[in-house]
């Protein structure tokens, strides 16, 4: 029993640290820069998972689709923020969905993950 409890504490600590790392802000240079086509920057950059979610809420659906088709969200979330789980969840979203449905599905996935990560930082 002692080892199970100790193992759980270590796991909780690791989960908390991982969640904090994922939720951190990154520099502008490492932020997610939104484009509505190749070379056409929208002027918006997200520097955290929270700001990414907030930016996505008001982003034009053509911008959302552009990045989704290229796998940009998954790359940034995985490589920059270090959240393989969220990248995998986004990858599983049906690409044939309408632009509005795609945006809504992305936002739901992001909101759920934000709640999970925020909860993990409090344990």
Image (cartoon, rainbow, N blue to C red):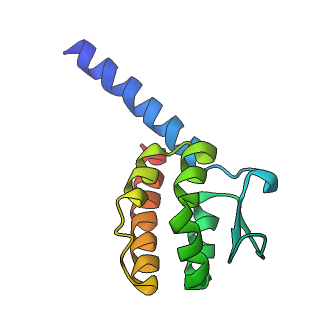
Depth order, front residue of 30/49? 30
Identify the residue at horizontal 44%, vertical 70% (top origin): 106
Residue found at the far left of this picture: 1
Q: Position of residue 78 (x, y in %)?
A: 54, 46
- Quarter in which the N terminus is drawn: top left
Q: Position of residue 42 (x, y in %)?
A: 75, 78
- Does residue 82 lie above or below 43 as drawn? above
Please give left or right for residue 73 compared with residue 101 in the image: right
- Does residue 21 lie above or below 2 as drawn? below
Identify the residue at horizontal 51%, vertical 38% (top origin): 18
Count up the numbered dots: 0
- Quarter in which the C terminus is drawn: top left
Please give left or right for residue 80 compared with residue 83 in the image: right
Q: Position of residue 31 (x, y in %)?
A: 72, 57
Q: Position of residue 21 (x, y in %)?
A: 59, 42
Identify the residue at horizontal 60%, vertical 47% (top origin): 81
Depth order, front residue of 54/10? 54
Identify the residue at horizontal 58%, vertical 73% (top origin): 66
């Amino acid at each position: 029993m002692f080892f199970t409890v100790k193992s759980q504490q270590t796991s909780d600590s690791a989960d908390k640290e991982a969640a904090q790392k994922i939720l951190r802000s990154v520099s502008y240079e490492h932020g997610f820069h939104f484009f509505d086509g190749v070379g056409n920057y929208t002027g918006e950059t997200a520097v955290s998972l929270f700001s990414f979610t907030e930016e996505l809420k008001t982003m034009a659906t053509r911008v959302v689709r552009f990045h989704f088709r290229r796998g940009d969200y998954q790359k940034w979330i995985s490589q920059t923020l270090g959240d393989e789980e969220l990248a995998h969840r986004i990858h599983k979203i049906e690409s044939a969905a309408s632009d509005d449905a795609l945006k809504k599905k992305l936002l739901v996935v992001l909101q759920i993950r934000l709640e999970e990560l925020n909860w993990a930082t409090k344990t």
